[in-house]
Structure formats: C-alpha cells, structure tokens
Amino acid sequence: MERLFDEFGRGLGFPARWSMSEIEPFWRTRGRGIAPVVDLVEKPDRYEVTAELPGMDEKNIEVKLSNGSLVISGEKKEEKEGKEANYFMTERRYGSFQRAIRLPEGVNADKIEASFKNGVLAVILPKTEEAKTETKINVKAA
C-alpha cells in the first residue's frame, strides 16, 4: 500500500515523501474547494437541508435560490498561532466553497428560512399547498 501511495505522488509531480496533509493546502491554493456535507430530508410539509460548516461564521455564508436549485456558498478564513519557549507556529486555512442542490417542484420560495448554530446551517423549504397533498391510487388486477 505504501508503494502505491509513493507511485501516486510521483505521478502528480509531488515528492513521494509528502504526506496527504501537506498536499491538501496545495489543492486549496489552486482554487479547488471542498463541498460541505449536506443532508436533505423530506417531511410532509417541508424539506429540511442541513450543511456542516465547522469553524465558519454566519456572515461568511450565503444561501440563495437560483434556477430551481438551493445554492450554499461561503468563504472560510482561519488563522492559528501558537507560541512556546523555543517554538513558534502559524497556520492559515482559507478557501471558498459552493454547493448547489436541485430542488423538486413545489417549494414555496417566499417562505424559505435559514439558521446557523454550532457550525451547522439549517435551511427550511416549505412545500406549497399543492405539493403537500397526497392522492391514493387504487391498484386493480389486470
């Protein structure tokens, strides 16, 4: 397995001794973002979308409805600094992301609500009255 990763690294032009944690910031600086983990749940009267956005602030998140899709985007800026006796370290993480989720027909766009708490974005998409109705269809023997 180790050899496989070494060959993989050489094929991309990276030194084989680099670990994946050292390569990750390289990908970010090239604009390749990481999409947040999203859950979509359908309830009788609404759809609920939750997205995990740890370390973010609500002012750096944008939620919009565009061409029948819910679009979640934002930018993360994080700086950590650590100081000890003979040691000094600074880490910076930043990058933007965007996630688009195609929504089914019947979402009441005027009543969409979004909230953010403890790194989790929750978006409530109420259904229109027509979308809430269910019709049972009888199955007949052929």
Image: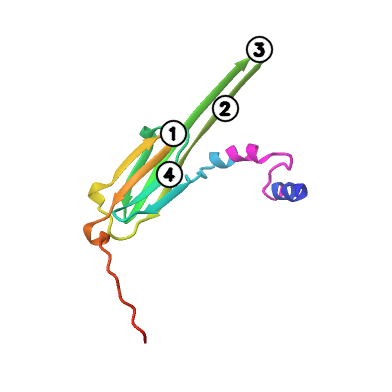
Relative to 139, does residue 7 appear above or below in the rendering? above
Decide: few, some or many residues near mark 2? Use Cα within 10 Å; few <14, some 14-19, many ≥20: few
Amino acid tagged 4: Ala
Asked if the stretch drawn in magenta spans residue 12, the answer is yes
Name the residue rendered at 23%, 61% in the picture.
Answer: 130
Residue stretch rendered in magenta on the structure: 10-25
Q: Secondary structure at mark 3?
A: loop
Sooner in the amino-acid sequence: mark 4 or mark 3: 4
Name the residue rendered at 43%, 46% in the picture.
Answer: 98
Disc 3 marks which residue? Answer: 85
Which of the numbered marks, if any, corresponds to residue 29? none
Of the residues tagged 4 and 3, which is closer to the observer?
A: 4
Disc 1 marks which residue? Answer: 56
Sooner in the amino-acid sequence: mark 4 or mark 2: 4
Relative to 137, does residue 56 appear above or below in the rendering? above
Is residue 132 rendered to the left or right of residue 37? left
Q: Nearer the viewer, residue 108 or 9?
A: 108
Distance between the alpha carbons at the discs numbered 3 and 2 = 18 Å
Decide: few, some or many residues near mark 1? Use Cα within 10 Å; few <14, some 14-19, many ≥20: many
Sooner in the amino-acid sequence: mark 3 or mark 2: 3
Sooner in the amino-acid sequence: mark 1 or mark 4: 4
Q: Secondary structure at mark 4?
A: strand
Point out residue 42 in the picture as x, y percentages from the top left corner: 36, 55
Disc 2 marks which residue? Answer: 91
Relative to 117, does residue 16 appear above or below in the rendering? below
Q: In the picture, residue 91 is in which quadrant?
A: top right
Q: Secondary structure at mark 2?
A: strand
Of the residues tagged 1 and 4, which is closer to the observer?
A: 4
Decide: few, some or many residues near mark 3? Use Cα within 10 Å; few <14, some 14-19, many ≥20: few
Q: Secondary structure at mark 1?
A: loop
Disc 4 marks which residue? Answer: 51
